[in-house]
DNA sequence: GTTAGGG
DNA sequence: CCCTAAC
């Protein structure tokens, strides 16, 4: 946090002209027309730095880090000065949220590049491991609020960090519009604050929990670790005093913060890294939201400084975590809003957008698209439209958050499969099928010993496809065996029945397979989804149906099913209804021509004329005397 | 959970 | 038969 807007500005001057390639300056610096430049490189697989291609540069330039990273690219920024480093780190913060490996390298510190990259990964890791609850964010928010008040109270002429953040933010807004005029005006403010911010930091250091002067490695470390454990804003702030710590202490702190050693000796880097870690640990989800939800925010983060990131992001976090509370969020920001109305406005805008609940369709799409990152923190379903506006910025957190709730792992015969909760896994029937399948599978291995059947043992993953084959095999095997399958295992009914139906009294077959589920199983072959289960209606069934209709009336399908189809459990009321519908159709279709329409087109069932007549009869009766 | 209808 | 909207 010791880094303020001013820092960037100041440093810029120092490194003026050091730019190697003047490309893609970020918004904050670009408008300024400052010579600050970035060298865009890409970290190839073997760790080498490859100069970015024009295309890549363009990409980064036009979109932003997030998008670039979204494109699954590993991008390394070679910063040419401190200011850039600052910005880049912030960026990294963003990019890392997208689960990308991004390395930002200060030009001067080539030797430490790898370290940087490496740590960035460490950062990612630590981030991914920390789940934060909404509650937590609320707490944080409150703390921030307190901070703000404090700052406003005893630092009238010394703007507290939060307001500063706002300034930054409003600046950002302007930049986006590329409004030079506004820019000029706004520029003053950040700069003027720069030194103040620094002072502020110092003040904090002495005032706050962590007297900097006192800052010995051990106390700091404990405090930090504590902070990491249960993030406390005040402590995070105390962080600022890292300035006074010796490198060694910083390294210690780094370790405490990230849980890993570091050999980096760059004090500045360490400080930032640590601060970053803490900050990030607090707004991981936020960044996600922010970015995905609103591009503006993402940019803001880039240009913003530590302090800004902390205060601002926290606000965002809370907002993000609280779907409906446009008001509450703004409330929190009110203290600062007084300073800049523009900020207030923009924030409200954002808040409003976030409130909108994702459509079901959207969620589905997300869950299908976003394969990875399903273990992200529970986020909020706030984003949506934004994503619709910028599809490229695949919603990260939302989807992820959503996904957490919407995904589930289904274990099928030993193997676990990730299934989006909305995935259209057949309802009711399908599950039974699977069960049947599993049963079959086990029985296959255990009970069945016949050679022909033994080779049916399938691996769960193959099950589906295998089943198809097996079906075919079964069909070609001996009848007796078929029977067995038909009864104990109910997958292959389609084939079996088609065969059996011809030469057996359907009724028998039905009763045999009955009570349990006789469903076929979902068979997928070559991507085509065959009809799950098909069981031709037998004459007796039709008769039963007709009788049932005559007894209970058409429409009382459940009744009919209950009474007339007690032995045919596989016929659902819907089935009955459908069949009746078909019968009706058939009966009326056949009647006009002749009374001998006993045979229907293909090989489908022979429906005796009498039955059809009866159907028509009933139909007319029913229509006359509606239920 | 049922029904009614469209696919 | 499947899938859904309405009940």
Image (tube, coloured by chain):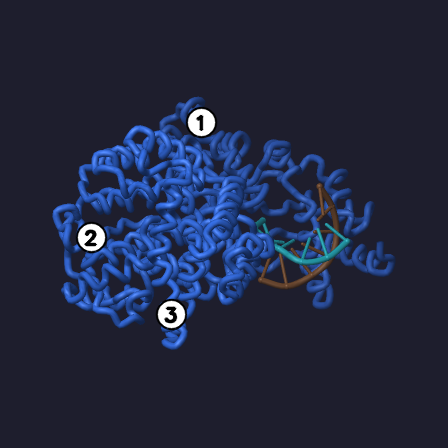
Chain colours: A blue, B brown, C cyan
> Circle 1 marks a residue in which chain?
A
Instruction: Please identify, in this view, whether the residue under mark 2 or under mark 1 is nearer the observer.
Output: 2
Front-most of residues A485 and A532:
A532
Element on which disc 1 rests: helix
A232 relative position to A427: left or right:
left
Decide if residue A549 is in sight here.
yes
**Quarter the C terminus of chain A occupies:** bottom right
Q: Secondary structure at mark 3?
A: helix
Q: What residue did someone put label 2 on? A: A105
For marks 2 and 1, the one nearer the N-term is 2
Same chain for labels 2 and 1? Say yes or no.
yes
Q: Horizontal placement of A544 versus A1: left or right?
A: right
Q: Residue at x 21, y 68 (%)?
A: A35
Towards the viewer: A113 or A191: A191
Q: Chain ID for label 2?
A: A
Q: Residue at the spot x=46%, y=38% of the render?
A: A409
Furthest residue toward right? A625
Picture disc at residue A208? none
- Residue placed under numbered mark 1 in the picture: A442
Q: CA distance from mark 2 to mark 1?
A: 57 Å
**Residue highlighted by disc 3:** A175
Alpha carbon distance from label 3 to label 1: 66 Å
- In the rendered image of this protein, does residue A615 appear above or below residue A464? below
Q: Mark 3 — on which chain does it sit?
A: A
Cα–Cα gap, marks 3 and 2: 25 Å
Identity of the residue drawn at 33% across and 33% down? A220
- The x, y position of residue A215, in whole percent, is 31, 34
């Amino acid at each position: 946090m010791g880094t303020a807007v001013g820092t960037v500005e100041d440093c810029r001057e120092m490194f003026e002209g050091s730019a190697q390639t003047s490309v893609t300056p970020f918004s904050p610096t670009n408008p300024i027309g400052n010579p600050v430049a970035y060298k865009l490189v890409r970290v190839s697989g073997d760790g080498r730095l490859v100069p970015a291609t024009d295309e890549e540069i363009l990409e980064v330039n036009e979109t932003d880090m997030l998008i670039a990273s979204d494109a699954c690219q590993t991008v390394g920024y070679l910063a040419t000065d401190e200011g850039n480093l600052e910005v880049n780190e912030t960026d990294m913060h963003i990019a890392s949220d997208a689960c990308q490996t991004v390395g930002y390298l200060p030009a001067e510190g080539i030797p430490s590049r790898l370290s940087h990259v490496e740590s960035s990964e460490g950062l990612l890791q630590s981030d991914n491991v920390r789940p934060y609850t909404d509650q937590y964010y609320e707490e944080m928010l409150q703390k921030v609020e307190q901070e703000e008040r404090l700052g406003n109270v005893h630092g009238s002429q010394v703007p507290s960090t939060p307001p500063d953040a706002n300034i930054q933010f409003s600046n950002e807004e302007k930049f986006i519009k590329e409004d030079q005029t506004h820019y000029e005006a706004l520029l003053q403010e950040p700069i003027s604050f720069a030194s103040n911010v620094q002072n502020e930091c110092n003040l904090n250091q002495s005032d706050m929990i962590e007297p900097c002067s006192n800052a010995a490695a051990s106390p700091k470390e404990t405090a930090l670790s504590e902070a990491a454990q249960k993030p406390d804003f005040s402590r995070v702030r105390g962080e600022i005093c890292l300035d006074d710590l010796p490198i060694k202490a910083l390294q210690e702190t780094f370790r405490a913060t990230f849980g890993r050693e570091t050999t980096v000796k760059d004090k500045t880097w360490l400080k930032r890294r640590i601060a970053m870690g803490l900050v990030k640990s607090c707004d991981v989800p936020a960044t996600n939201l922010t970015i995905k939800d609103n591009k503006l925010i993402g940019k803001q983060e880039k240009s913003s400084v530590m302090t800004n990131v902390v205060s601002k992001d926290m606000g965002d976090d809370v907002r993000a975590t609280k779907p409906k509370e446009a008001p509450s969020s703004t409330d929190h920001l009110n203290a600062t809003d007084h300073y800049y109305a523009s900020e207030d406005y923009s924030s409200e805008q954002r808040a409003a957008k976030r409130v909108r609940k994702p459509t079901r369709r959207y969620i589905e799409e997300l869950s299908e698209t976003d394969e990875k990152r399903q273990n992200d923190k529970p986020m909020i379903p706030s984003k949506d439209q934004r994503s619709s506006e910028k599809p490229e910025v695949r919603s990260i957190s939302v989807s992820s958050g959503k996904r957490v709730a919407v995904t589930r792992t289904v274990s099928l015969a030993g193997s676990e499969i990730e299934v989006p909760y909305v995935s259209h896994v057949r309802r009711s029937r399908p599950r039974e099928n699977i069960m049947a399948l599993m049963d079959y599978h086990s029985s296959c291995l255990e009970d069945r010993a016949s050679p022909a059947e033994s080779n049916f043992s399938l691996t769960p993953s193959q099950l589906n496809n295998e089943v198809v084959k097996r079906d075919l095999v079964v069909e070609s095997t001996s009848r007796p065996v078929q029977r067995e399958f038909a009864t104990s295992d109910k997958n292959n009914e389609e084939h079996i029945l088609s065969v059996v139906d011809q030469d057996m009294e359907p009724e028998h077959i039905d009763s045999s397979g009955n009570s349990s589920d006789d469903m076929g199983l979902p068979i997928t072959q070559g991507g085509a989804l065959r009809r799950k289960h098909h069981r031709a209606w037998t004459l007796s069934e039709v008769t039963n149906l007709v009788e049932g209709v005559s007894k209970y009336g058409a429409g009382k399908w459940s009744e009919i099913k209950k009474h007339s189809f007690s032995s045919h459990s596989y016929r659902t009321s819907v089935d009955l209804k459908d069949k009746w519908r078909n019968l009706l159709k058939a009966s009326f279709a056949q009647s006009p021509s002749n009374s001998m329409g006993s045979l229907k087109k293909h090989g489908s069932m022979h429906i005796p004329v009498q039955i059809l007549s009866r159907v028509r009869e009933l139909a007319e009766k029913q229509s006359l005397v509606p239920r």
